[in-house]
Amino acid sequence: MRRLSVVDEIFLRTHRGLGTPIALQGLWRTEDPVEPVELARLHAALRTGPLGRRVVRPRIPGARSRWQSSDRAHRLDLHGAAVAPEEIPGWADTRGALLDPEHGPGWRLSAAPLTTGGTIVALTCSHVLADARGLIIAVERALQELDSGADADTPARPGNGTTPEPAGAQDSDWADAARIWATVAFGGMRAAAARIPRGLRIPRGEWNPDPGKAAVARGPAVGGTADAAHAADAPAPDRPEASPDPHSASGHGEMSEPALILRCPAEEWERIATAYRGTANSLFIWTVANMLWAAGFPATEITASLPVDTRDELRIDNDLAMTEIAVTPQDGPADIRAKSRAAYERRISAPGGLPEEFLYLVPDRVAHLLSRGAGERDILCSNIGPVPPALSALGSSECTGLATRALHPGLRYGDRPRTRLSGYLCRFRDDYILTFASLYPERIADAAALHRLATATAERVDLPIRPW
């Protein structure tokens, strides 16, 4: 059976209030209206495809959570009110609520008519279920299934939903736990525990038997660690204090995340990147960094977080790693290209040099504090790459555009990450599609501000961007 990775577990903890909640979203625009029956067939194919799964927690301390098939899904979300193109990001923001990868459903398919004709379709899923490339793979498989003539009313595959655990699942948990404990012990449990920052200690004799709760309860001990009771008050590494919500005296109000979607002809984007001796990717990173400086970001150096696709087969899991580069105002696309090339040879390592398996052996709250802020830097630049041709149509309706992004449903100021500006890039047919999202309300309060910053930055290199 497939087990959750450390990255999966980090995203899973955010659904329990430990960190920044993250959902992924793909947006399609079509030239003609998409018929409800075609959307229903896509919904059914997704329900019984690789997104149709949920997390099952282990009963054995140290064992990893595993995946179980589940055909539970939110109902197809069809909206009657037409959406204007400039309202798409705001409409799409509302599609990320109530995603639960553990008890289900972890994804939602939504659609609304556009005032200009056609349809906007949003597929939103918990980041636990898939990364961005994985979400694209899941949709590609669903569309290929429909093209092959599969019946959308075919019963769900056996084993989905309520099927009891397969025989031997408990033994598998024991075997997995034994491997994890042996790995950490071989790496030096005492040495690993000694590298935990001061304040992150678990009282001897304490464990969290219900990982769904943040509180630490009585149970077996994790040898050598102690006193997590005060760990929640420990400052997060590399994570500045969140600015208070101007509308909330407590600073814990819900935070908006204005977004903007733009497009640029791929030929022009690549021509300008080449003119500056860069690549399409380094021009993208340059754009996001300089938008943040244009907004008044005070630091003279911006650290960029760069996701790296590490999959060696077409699976939907979070098969990614993170690396980073430091960008200065003097850096052009050529400098960023060189820095990125070197960065892709290394990865952001486990917190404090701990073996990553150590995070399976401690309660959720401590694991969160040890991994808190992992991968978070001043900006996020996620280059998702080319979109497969299979996603160029939904049923009989041609797609005129496809955008990808992440969003943070229910994000509160107190949980705001270090990231101040996120950028997402993909190639769809003859265009590069850019999505920008602000987590910096002090400087970038709305989509209009994002548009001004993007326009001013693009004009510096004669980049012909236009609304999506």
Image: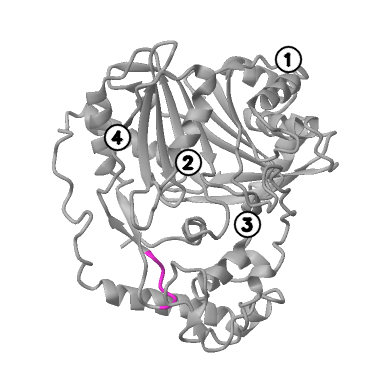
The first of marks 4 and 3 along the sequence is 4
Residue annotated with mark 2: 24
- CB under 8 Å between discs 3 and 1: no
Residue tagged 4: 76
Identified by mark 2, the residue type is Leu
Please report whichever mark, 2 or 3, sits nearer to the chain's N-terminal start.
2
Colour treatment of the image: one colour
In the depicted structure, whether residue 409 falls above or below residue 258: below
Which residue in the structure is indicated by mark 3? Answer: 374
Counting from the top left corner in percent of width and height, residue 284 is at: 66, 30
Mark toward the start of the polypeptide (2 vs 4): 2
Q: Nearer the viewer, mark 2 or mark 3?
A: 2
**Residue 126's x, y, as percent?**
44, 47
Label 1 to label 2, Cα distance in Å?
31 Å
- To which quarter of the image does residue 271 belong? top right
Near-viewer residue (35 or 84): 84
- Label 1 crowd (10 A; few <14 / some 14-19 / many >=20): few
Q: Quadrant of the N terminus?
A: bottom left
User: The disc labelled 3 sits on which kind of residue?
Assistant: Ala
In the shown orientation, is residue 186 left or right of residue 418? Answer: left
Q: CA distance from mark 4 to mark 3?
A: 34 Å
Name the residue beneath numbered marker 1. 462
Kind of residue indicated by mark 1: Asp
Please tell me whether mark 2 or mark 4 is closer to you in this view. Answer: 4
Q: Write the start and end of the magenta stretch as one range.
A: 61-65
